[in-house]
Amino acid sequence: MRSISSFRDFDWMLLSLVSLVSLISVLEIKSATMHTKFRGFDEKQIGFLLVGMGLMFLISMVDYHWLLEISPWAYGVSLVLLVVVRVAGARVMGARRWINLGGGVHFQPSEWVKLVLIIFVARFFWYHAGRGLGWLDIFRAFAMVCVPMALVLIQPDLGTALTYFPILVAGLFLGGIRPRQVAILFLGVAIVAGGAFFSGKRLKPYQQARLTSFMNPDADPKGSGYQIRQSLIAVGSGGLWGKGANKGTQTQGDFLPIPYTDFIFAAFCEEHGFVGGMGVLFLYFLILMRLIQDAQQAPDIPAAFIVMGVVAVLLFQILVNIGMVVGLMPVTGIPLPLMSYGGSSIIFSFLALGIVMNIRMRRFVN
Amino acid sequence: MALNSKPERRTDRDEKVSATKLHATQYVVVIVLAILATGMWRLQILGVTNYRLLADANRVRKIPVVAPRGKIFDREGRILVDNYPSVSCYLLREQAKSLDADVPMIARGLDLPVEQVQLILRRYAAQPKYVPIPLKQDITPDEQAFIEAHRNELPELETLDEQRRLYPRDGFAAHLIGYVGEVSEEDLNTSKFDFYEPGDMVGKFGVEETYDSILRGTDGSRDVVVDSHGRDVGQLGQTLAIPGQDLRLTIDLDLQRVAEQAMQGRNGAIVAMDPHTGEILAMVSRPTFDPNQFAVRLTKAYWSQVSSDPDHPMMNKAIQAQYAPGSTFKIIMSLAGLEEGVAQGMRVMCSGGATFYGRFFHCDHAHGMVDIDHAIPWSCDTYYYTLAEKLGIDTIAKYATEVGLSQKTGVDLPDEATGTMPSTAWKLKTQHDKWYAGDTISVGIGQGAVQATPLQLARALSGIASGGVFKRPHLVFPDELPSGMASAIDATYPGSGDSTLPIAPDVWETITDGMAQTMLPGGFDTGAAVRLEGIDFAGKTGTAQVVNHSVNGNNLLTGNARANAWFVGMVPRRNPDIVVAVLCEHGGWGAEAAAPLAAQVINAFVSKQRRREGNLLAVTPKPAPTPAPTPPANGTPTALVTTEPRPTAARTAIVNRP
């Protein structure tokens, strides 16, 4: 096994695609914040990107097998951090999601846990690969994902908690779950969901409101339907070519909520139209296809699992975020990978990509 | 735990994940991205028009620009009603963060009761959110400062410069001008107010109501670009407000002023009109109210004060007070008697009253032998009792109706009263009873069920003294109105209007001569007390009992039972240039209470004409009229047949027109 790999094998293609999306992100953040008190977020985003890229190079140097080795420990530490953040985290807008590291730096364990989970799940299915999944295995996989998910859910942070789920789904799918098992699982979930519904255990009011406003955005235009409504107006009024950079009335007039994070794609579509939006979708398509190709060329099973875990998370976040922006999904507060402003999200994305690079650079190891 | 146990490296096993499965995930990626692209297509390609409109609706706010209301002038262009700039506070619900929570703060800052703010909000609850709610008008500088200082906490408050009505002080001409107020909810539900919106100011009374459509103009708007906090970030365009048209009234400010002063401290009404045209020269009602109180914000206290006042300040008594006309009705009786050929040869012996149908009816003097020429100046009740008996109620009613009683005159003011003229048909209809001949007797002197408004009497006298040409009284020159408006006004305010009643020349000459005698010294009637030197002043007083119509004169002079004093007069006696009707509620004797007030108005009119004519070339005097009433048989003083000395400097048309 070759332990030293060369940067000649580094996935420059992927890096170019990611850099392009990042550049679009910075420009759109600049446009969306230029007239607000968040002015300058584009520069901070550049900082996050640089840190992210640095971390990406660093993690690509470390053999992912070592990451697999330590993942149980990392998983344990993650659970502890989630408990700590629940007890001692900084309360922001009614949720404890952050650990204050001092000096204005906040650490969001739930993003970090996502990465750990991808590796830990990969390791788990590696162990079981080809053997067929027994019910006990499926239960264990569920437990692995659902324990941190529950801890994030009670922060409360439904959005991030949901992003753990595709990791499980990808793992089960690639790990060899049988169709019959899938059918039984669906039945079980349906029964549990039905039971929960009738037992009166409901979503929190704001989550209920979000679902209601997703179904009917005009029901309460100034309330929770407001975000979806303004987002639809922003995207729709962009038309084919958009209103031009820095000229989106919804974005510049502060009608579109948080146009630099969750709704950045709406802002972009308003200013750059259907053509621009399709361009970004195409970039995502290339990135995801490249990642799947990396999985196909992966040197071993856990490597493929890791890459596909990353693919699952990215695809899920793209689906939920853009789906929300165009009114196909409820508001969940999931950032758009590589586009939305935010250090934790950016750093997760680049760390995940770094591991993929790591795997790619070792693809000729056998 | 198994989860944390170190997995064995099973390098012997298949080291590749199933290629089919990885391939399948590629399809999943394509499907997911295709779904998202479809969503974008739906919004950006199919829905672009709709969403562009919504985006504009978001950022473009229509700020109403209220059209200044037309000013109101008198006939000579002197201003009666002006506008002044003022600031109003509006509430924009779309801007509110939490409207319900803000209400107490808004109420405090604008010095309004919390309940009132809530009431206003509730009234607009059914309106779309973008409709601005007028919260308070004519706010003080302090309140303006409050709004400016709380832009951040209360972004929903907005100020707007507006023009407000400035009415004459002290209720001057208040009843004819009327006032403006916020359009009421009930009004909005009627078709007449289809083009009005809540919060619009609308004329509520007087000419402000009648001519609202031309006075109000058309509101404009400014399209302002705002951000989501309502901050003004630019302007797109504007629709200019079209100011309301100015309105020139037929009112003569000089006469109006004299009439106002004359009525000061009294209850009742004065109306002066030009019989040639029907133009109303002055119209006063007392007590009066302050329209300025209505124009801005009507306080409960003021409203309850004016609405509960037993003297009815909100009533325009010139057109709404309906009282027994008393002896002024004798003009109409004389017309009926002469036209029917009954009065000419009729002589009545007056011994202070007479008995009809077993009941004694009083006259205030024993006039002796009375004929028609003396019956009018002496106002002999006995004569008219007899005449009424001879004519019968339906003949009296026929003439009274023809000169305009028991119907609206059609004046261009809202809510005119009709009055009452009894007849057999009327009694059958209203009381389901037959008419008793005895009831006719008191009708002969304008008592009983007869009721008329001052304006009805003025119009009736105008027509009779003009030889039967009756004009619709009006306050606005019809030819100055937009085309179609005049006929629309006529249709909206129907009434007797313009009409002609052929009256034989000797009939109306006899009547007007009799009225001229009334005003001369030597006449038994105290009308002579207000004789105007050098003016051919003719008139008829009336003292109409309020409580009952048994003629004994005992209760004429006390309190609310006191008689209503009437006077109708004109100058000159034939084809008069001005007719004045005066009503003094509970004023007592018409000659003492009402006639002097009319004399003041007529005096002002004449001296104004003289002043004006004095500045012009002298007009060749027309031949003097020859009023030649038949000398009474019992040898009345010669003064009765002498005409007034002819004023040398006076315009002949006024005093000498036959």
Image (tube, coloured by chain):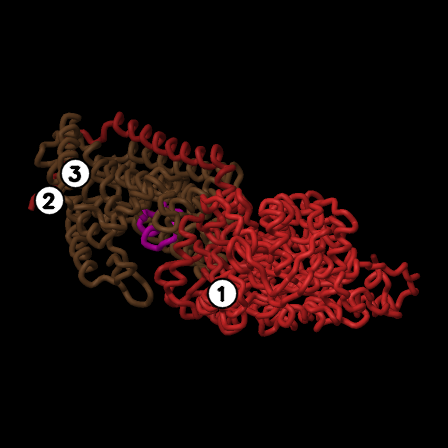
Chain colours: A brown, B red
Q: Secondary structure at mark 3?
A: helix
* Quadrant of the snapshot with the C terminus of chain B: bottom right
Q: Secondary structure at mark 1?
A: loop
**For the residue carrying disc 2, how many other residues have a C-alpha within 10 Å: few (<14), some (14-19), or many (20+)?**
some
**For the residue carrying disc 1, how many other residues have a C-alpha within 10 Å: few (<14), some (14-19), or many (20+)?**
some
Q: CA distance from mark 1 to mark 3?
A: 61 Å
Q: Quadrant of residue B71?
A: bottom right
Three-letter code, disc 3 = Ala
Q: Quadrant of residue B77?
A: bottom right
Frontmost residue, B278 versus A41: B278
The percent position of residue A27, horizontal first and vertical second, equals 48, 50
Q: Which residue in the structure is indicated by mark 1? A: B298
Between disc 2 and disc 1, whose residue precedes? Answer: 2
Q: Which residue in the structure is indicated by mark 3? A: A193
Report the span colored magenta. Answer: A333-348
Q: Is residue B80 left or right of residue B141?
A: right
The percent position of residue A354, horizontal first and vertical second, equals 32, 46
Relative to B299, say whether B226 is above or below: above
Q: Is residue A161 visible?
A: yes
Q: Is residue B534 left or right of residue A237?
A: right
The chain that hosts pointer 3 is A
The percent position of residue A256, horizontal first and vertical second, equals 43, 50
Q: Is residue B82 left or right of residue B16?
A: right
